[in-house]
Image (tube, rainbow, N blue to C red):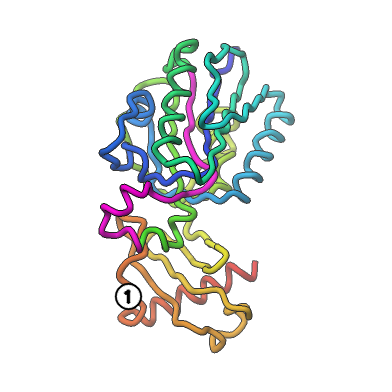
Amino acid sequence: MKRTPLIIISVKSLSPLALSIYGNETISTLHLDQLAWTGTVFHEYHSSNEGFAKAFDQVQMYCNENHLSFASNSISVGELPAEIMPVEWDILWYRIDNDRDETATDVVQAIEQLIYRIIQKLDINSCNWIITAESGGFLNKEQSSAASFASDYQNSLTRQFWAPLIISPIGDITEHCRNHALLSVDDLLTLICEQSGWNSEFTMKGREEILLESENQMGLRTSKWLLCLPRTEKDPMNDHSDLLEEPELFAKPEDRFDLNDISQSEPELTSELMQKLREMIKK
């Protein structure tokens, strides 16, 4: 039985807010939007470069162990192949490299152009698709300067990890879905297997909480809350009294920005989440 191919397109760094499907009104991406509107857009997906590299290796290993053909192509934003050759693979993974000299708009247009060149050879509805990024990213300068939350967004802990994730499975056209399940890049292999129907023992489930760690901050993300605290030379988790600054607590219903610290008005909840954070770090 012939398997349905899966095409994955990933970029190194991209803010979801650079995509029209996440609310950007300044950019047009007809083919990317077509995939998004016939699939699922995840609004609570967290990724990092380190975690993504591990997930990429896991996918390759899974394919080798289960006799699935796998190929990956690394290309740059400014050097997309003029023509995509139709090749028979179970998973064909295009990795688009981008650096800080390229704007988010450049990256999004590269994704759109790559999809267009692929569907010149393959019917868009003949493949499963996953569009994602290794990690989150900055807004364009124009978008940042025009946004009232620009400063908060650029300093946000979640900005560094919140990444786009769009899946479009073959089959009956499903109604577009905004999925707020709390997912980590550690779930990527499970998601790929579930969408391709390769292994019934994989079941996608939302997480209760996710540990986020950057160079200057650490945090605990749950479906409702984000607890943030600064890193110090001493591990602040070993002794609460060593904290140089109080932790910050944010309610996270629809947005992904660290605004309106409520730790002072919710001391019991802050303490409870601090304890959870300690427990996760000790694991």
Stretch of the chain drawn in magenta: 127-151
Residue 102 placed where, x, y %?
47, 40
Could you tell me which residue is drawn at 59 percent across and 29 percent down?
A: 75
Of residues 82 and 129, the one nearer the viewer is 82
The location of residue 203, given as percent across then percent down, is 53, 41
The structure residue drawn at horizontal position 48% and vertical position 12%, both measured from the top left corner, is 122
Q: Quadrant of the C terminus?
A: bottom right
- Is residue 72 left or right of 169 when viewed as pictured? right
Please state the total of marks drawn on the protein image.
Answer: 1
Q: Residue 34 in the image: x percent, y percent?
A: 34, 25
Up/down of 143 relative to 282, above or below: above
Front residue of 146 and 271: 146
Q: Secondary structure at mark 1?
A: loop
User: In the image, what residue type sits under mark 1?
Assistant: Ile
Question: Image quarter for residue 153?
Answer: bottom left
Crowd class of label 1 (few under 14; some 14 to 19; many from 20; radius 10 Å): some
Q: Residue furthest front?
A: 101
Residue 87 in the image: above or below residue 24: above
Residue 244 x/y as whole percent: 51, 84
Q: Residue furthest bottom?
A: 241
Q: Residue at x 44, y 58 (%)?
A: 158
Instruction: Indicate whether 266 appears above or below 90.
Output: below
Which quadrant holds the N terminus? top right
Residue 132 shown left or right of residue 57 in the figure: left
In the image, is 234 to the left or to the right of 4?
Answer: right
Q: Is residue 5 above or below residue 131?
A: above
The verdict on residue 130 being magenta is yes
Q: Residue 19: within the magenta? A: no
What residue did someone put label 1 on?
262
Give the residue at x 46% y 15%. 126
